[in-house]
Image (tube, rainbow, N blue to C red):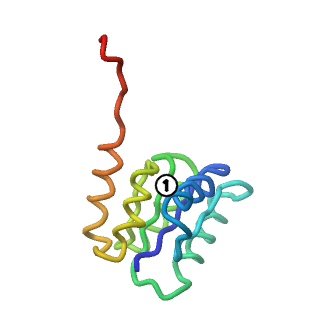
Amino acid sequence: MIRGIIVGHGDFAKAILKTAELILGEQPEVEVISNRGFSCASMTEKINEVISKGDCKSTIIFLDLPGGSCTMSCYSILKEISDLHIISGVNLPMLIEFFMLRDKYSADDLDSILVKKGKDNIIQLRSRNE
C-alpha cells in the first residue's frame, strides 16, 4: 500500500482527510502535517520523520499550494530523495482517487492518474441560459 502524507497550511490537511474519510471510511497509512507552529526546517524534519517510519515502500506527498513553506520543505527533501512523489494542488476528487487506487498501482503510475483526476474536476458551472 502506498502511504499518503497531506501537508498544508492551518487545518487544511486535517480537514480534507476527514472529508475523504466521511465518503470512503477511515484510511490507514495516511498522515497529516500542518505548517502551524513549524519553521521550514522543523517541518522538513517532521516530514522526514513520517517518511522514514512504517513499512510502506512508496509515499506520495500531497501539498495544498505550489508555493510557500510547505512546498519549500518538501522540495528540500526531494533533493535528497529523488524518487519521492509529491503532488501540489491536492483536491478532494484527487485524494479520493488516491485512496481507491493506491493498492492497485505503483506510485510512479499513480502520479499521472491523480494529477489528471484533480485537473478534470476543476470546472466552471454555468446556467443553461448562458
- Position of residue 32 measured from the top left corner of the image (x, y, whole percent): 60, 64
**Residue assigned mark 1:** 63
- Against 34, is 79 above or below? below
Determine whether, in the image, residue 63 is placed left or right of residue 97. Answer: right
Please name whichever residue, 126 or 38, is drawn nearer the observer in this view of the structure. Answer: 126
Query: Looking at the figure, which quarter contains the C terminus?
Result: top left
Which residue does the image show at 37% across and 26% down from the upper left?
A: 125
Determine whether, in the image, residue 85 is placed left or right of residue 8. Answer: left
Determine whether, in the image, residue 117 is placed left or right of residue 37. Answer: left
- Position of residue 128 measured from the top left corner of the image (x, y, whole percent): 30, 17
Determine whether, in the image, residue 55 is placed left or right of residue 32. Answer: left
Please name whichever residue, 111 or 73, is drawn nearer the observer in this view of the structure. Answer: 111
- Position of residue 43 measured from the top left corner of the image (x, y, whole percent): 63, 63
- Against 101, is 7 above or below? above
**Where, by quadrant of the figure, is residue 21 drawn?**
bottom right
The amino acid marked with disc number 1 is Leu
Q: Residues within 10 Å of mark 1 (few under 14, many from 20)?
A: many
Which residue does the image show at 27% across and 70% down from the upper left?
A: 108
Please name whichever residue, 65 or 117, is drawn nearer the observer in this view of the structure. Answer: 117
Query: Looking at the figure, which quarter contains the N terminus?
Result: bottom left
- Position of residue 51 measured from the top left corner of the image (x, y, whole percent): 52, 77
- Against 49, is 86 above or below? above
